[in-house]
Image (cartoon, rainbow, N blue to C red):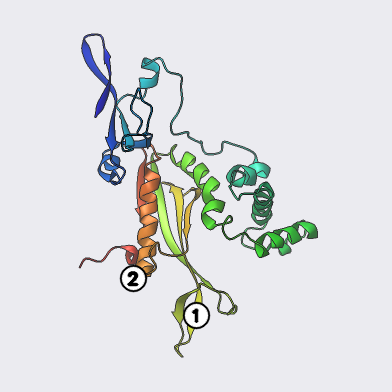
Amino acid sequence: MKTDMYEDDSLEIWAVETFVDPSYSGTCFTAAGFHWVGQTQGRPAPTNACTRSKKAIFVYEFSSGWRTRLGLPAAPIYPILELGAGPDADQWAEREFGAADLEHKARTDRLVKSVDLLSRSPGKPITKNIEISRSAVAGYYRFLERPDTEAMTPERILAPHRVQTIKQMRGEDTVLCVIDKTKISYSTRPACEGLDVIGTNQTEAKSRGIRMHTTLALTSNGLPLGVLRNGFAPSDPDVEHPNRQRWLDAVDDVVECAKEIRRSTRMVVVIEREGLPVAK
């Protein structure tokens, strides 16, 4: 562990850093308030050759003004987006999804347009909004019908919105991470592949569809900050209880998210009893 720095004749600790083998997740450091800031290159001076194992770097700040004391320019590691800040409503879709990496600018542009169309008719099909042109609706459906399954993944689509959500979470003293599930039925579409059994009726007929586990970030007053995750399948589909695994995957994602939040922000996970691990 390295300590920086000294001032006059008295010891004044501004920040400490520690190096962790990447085979360990560093959970104990995260729990103690350390922040992961990157990874070493395994290149000791002066050779500049990669001869050492790479290490994860965790930093603990004792003084928020340590950069100023070292004569360094201001560079916030964790930018904060205040509530109500940012573009006007007509630019919201661009801010939230304009940075999506779909491997083609035309796809990202169409994503932004599609989000804008959906936001004009929340909870309703876009065809119900008479103000939307037919060409815009046609473009929206082309976007859905011909996806590149490798480039247009749920994670890539949501990624820029997740970044903006985390920026707003940093400005709150307390954030509620509400995890809940939604069953989406595809029983009328038997040709769809990769569906899960989401229920049975009185005749034991099985309904197929998607079990979606969503993590919604809220302020302590219930104001939505954004969606952190939409999970459709467990990380390990061969586990004994895949539905419980979906809940645990969502909780693990909140833990990862906490690494990007300032220590003063308290994160509270709200989850159903179904998602709690069962003691053996």
Question: In front: 8, or 239?
Answer: 239
Question: Which amino acid is tagged 2?
Answer: His
Q: Position of residue 262 (x, y in %)?
A: 38, 36
Q: Residue at x 74, y 58 (%)?
A: 139
Relative height, residue 260 to residue 232 (above, below):
above
Q: Is residue 25 left or right of residue 177?
A: left
Residue sitting at the far top: 8
Which quarter of the figure is the N terminus placed in? Answer: top left
* Mark number displayed over residue 207: 1
Q: Position of residue 107 (x, y in %)?
A: 66, 52
Mark earlier in primary sequence (1, 2): 1
Question: In front: 280, or 118?
Answer: 280
The local crowd at label 2, few if under 14, some if 14 to 19, many if 20 or more residues have their Cα within 10 Å, is: few
Q: Position of residue 33 (x, y in %)?
A: 29, 37
Mark closer to the observer (1, 2): 2
The residue under label 2 is: 241
Which quarter of the figure is the C terminus placed in? Answer: bottom left
Residue 78 falls in which quadrant of the image?
A: top left
Q: Residue at x 28, y 63 (%)?
A: 277
Kindly tell me whether residue 133 is visible in this rendering.
Answer: no
Kindly tell me whether residue 106 is visible in this rendering.
Answer: yes
* Mark number displayed over residue 117: none
* Gap in angstroms between the C-alphas marked 1 and 2: 19 Å
Q: Residue at x 35, y 21 (%)?
A: 66
